[in-house]
Image: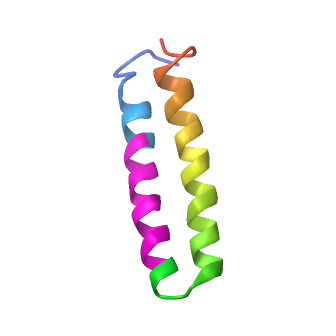
């Protein structure tokens, strides 16, 4: 909205994607399937934000 530090949103979304990927792997190894599924969904959403903000909708 204010066009200040617009690189922070896609960078943060990339970080959240990497964090959720690691969390999903850890939960899957421990046999906690419901938690792994939640992490996968959140990772996909974060990846969508990162792709959109780095790609066609970047400022």
Image height of 23 relative to 1, above or below: below
Considering depth in this image, is 8 or 55 the residue closer to the camera? 55
Residue 13 relative to residue 57: left or right: left
Where on the picture, by quarter, is residue 37?
bottom right
Name which residue lies at 39% across and 53% down: 18
Name the spot of residue 39 as percent of width and height, x first.
56, 65
Q: Where is residue 5 in the image (x, y as percent from the top left)?
A: 34, 22
Q: Where is residue 4 in the image (x, y as percent from the top left)?
A: 37, 19
Q: Which residue is drawn at 52% across and 29% down?
A: 51
Give yes or no for residue 17 being in the magenta stretch: yes
| Residue that sits furthest to the bottom in the current view | 31
Q: Tell me the residue at 45%/41% (across/down).
A: 13
- Label count reads 0
Quarter of the image for residue 31 reads: bottom right
State the residue lying farthest toward the front: 29
Q: Position of residue 15 (x, y in %)?
A: 37, 47
Q: Residue at x 43, y 15 (%)?
A: 3
Q: Which colour scheme is used?
A: rainbow
Numbered range of the magenta stretch: 14-27
Magenta span: predominant SS is helix
Give 31 or 17, whichever is nearer the viewer.
Answer: 31
Q: Is residue 15 above or below residue 48?
A: below
Is 51 on the left-hand or right-hand side of 22?
A: right
Query: Is residue 23 magenta-colored?
Result: yes
């Amino acid at each position: 909205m204010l066009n200040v530090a617009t690189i922070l949103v896609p960078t943060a979304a990339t970080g959240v994607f990497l964090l959720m990927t690691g969390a999903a792997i850890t939960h899957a190894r421990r046999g906690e399937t419901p938690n792994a599924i939640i992490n996968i969904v959140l990772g996909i959403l974060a990846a969508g934000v990162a792709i959109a903000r780095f790609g066609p909708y970047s400022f």
